[in-house]
Image (cartoon, rainbow, N blue to C red):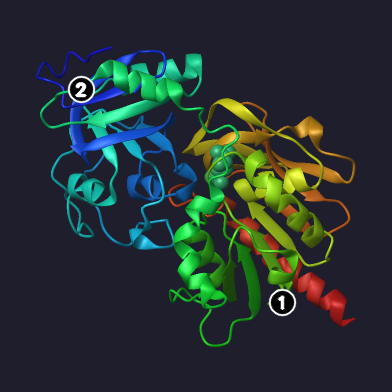
Amino acid sequence: MSDAWTQRKPTALLVLADGTVIEGDGIGAVGEALGEVCFNTSLTGYQEILTDPSYARQIVTFTFPHIGNVGANDEDIEDLVPDNNVGAVGAIFRAEVSAPSNYRSAGGLDAWLKKRGVVALSGVDTRALTALIRERGMPNAVLAHNPDGVFDIEALRAKAAGWSGLVGLDLAKDAASDRAEVWTEGPWVWNAGYGAGENPAYTIVAIDYGAKRNILRLMSGHGARVVIVPPTASAADVLQHDPDGIFLSNGPGDPAATGEYTVPVIRELARSGIPMFGICLGHQLLALALGGRTEKMHQGHHGANHPVKDFTTGKVEIVSMNHGFAVAADSLPAGVEETHVSLFDGTNCGLRMKDAPVFSVQHHPEASPGPQDSHYLFARFFEMIDAHRTRSAA
Ligand SMILES: NC(=O)CC[C@H](N)C(=O)O
């Protein structure tokens, strides 16, 4: 599928496990990135997308043709630790990345990708690649960038074919491993100056499976002091902070694999009576803890324009999504209610416990990037906390 646009010698190749080779111009980091290739249909927010830790071991194809025009800056990064570089390992663009033009730009996308170690490919037919992913599912691949244009295609194919893929892979511990040093010094309180101030109204304990920054920013904006604990935290580790609410974060990898060590903890916390809210991986882990099942999707959901229906209000919201696994709605046991559904394919997008203040969603109410229709879910969480406090005080 070489692109008629670029007749010059390719300096980057995407080599799929089945031997398909897509040629183009290399940008960003020089080297090889191994991962699963997906497509993202967002029109804006490429920095937030590429720095979302949930994209670990993934290569993102941007369906929007012109990426890079607003450059790069230090603020639009979603990973909690800026130099950690957990997130997408590769990126694929239709058009050549042009010079940035935006008042917030601190430099070009190419240099930023290099600094972050993201291998990228431009000048390829992203529509054809997206059609291929829709037909065959998300392929494993190697994205290789060599400015001299020298590649051992067979070795790259063998590397892609030899990788067992995302299924069965726990990446939450990896995504959070850079925080290890912080955690040895005790609880890590999110204090990036986003709202809660001197006298926070709530303490939220967030279990960090690879959390996005805007989630913490929004909770802080609701007046919360957010204590971040590692993915391996026990129920006692969480409860020792006397939380008003417990948050289960988004994160990379296969929920079933991460569930092996998180399910018993979440099950215990879900029965503690303390309000609990989960997003994306947090939603999937909660479903597993309550007795449900997760499964790999064919092409996944990655974009900022997905319609979701909230059964509890009857309203439709346009949401941000990034997931390649989903909760099987028919696996939810009695006592757990499906609250949200994707209007694209009917897959599960939310649940709640009928007899406890515990709920979660598959999509990303924090957006970043994306529409803010689902911000109400944060308000719902804090209303639940207020109601719980009133009940406890009575
Ligand atoms: N954004 C997320 O938390 C992603 C969850 C999970 N890794 C998936 O791909 O489905």
How crowded is the residue under tag 2: few (<14 C-alpha within 10 Å), some, or many (20+)?
A: some
Look at the numbered discs 1 and 2 and tell me whether their residues touch, using CB distance below 8 Å: no
Find residue 320 and report its horizontal and vertical position in percent: 51, 43
Left or right of residue 52, residue 266 in this image: right
Q: Is residue 201 visible?
A: yes
- Residues 297 and 171: in front is 171
Residue at mark 1 to residue at mark 2: CA–CA distance: 54 Å
Left or right of residue 305, residue 334 in this image: right
Residue 159 occupies quadrant: top left
Please name the amino acid that badge 2 sits on.
Phe
Q: Quadrant of the C terminus?
A: bottom right
Q: Where 230 sits versus 342, above or below?
A: below
Left or right of residue 348, residue 102 in this image: left
- Look at discs 1 and 2 and give the one toward the viewer: 2
Q: Where 94 sits versus 75, above or below?
A: above
Residue 131 occupies quadrant: top left
Residue, x 46% and y 47% (percent of image)? 370
Residue, x 79% and y 76% (percent of image)? 389
Q: Where 183 sits versus 316, above or below?
A: below
- Residues 318 and 68: in front is 68
In terms of sequence position, does the residue under pointer 1 or pointer 2 come before the other?
2
The secondary element bearing badge 2 is classed as: loop
Q: Quadrant of the N terminus?
A: top left
The residue that mark 1 highlights is 240
Picture quadrant of ligand 1? top right
How crowded is the residue under tag 1: few (<14 C-alpha within 10 Å), some, or many (20+)?
A: few
- Residues 235 and 129: in front is 235
**Mark identifier at residue 151:** 2
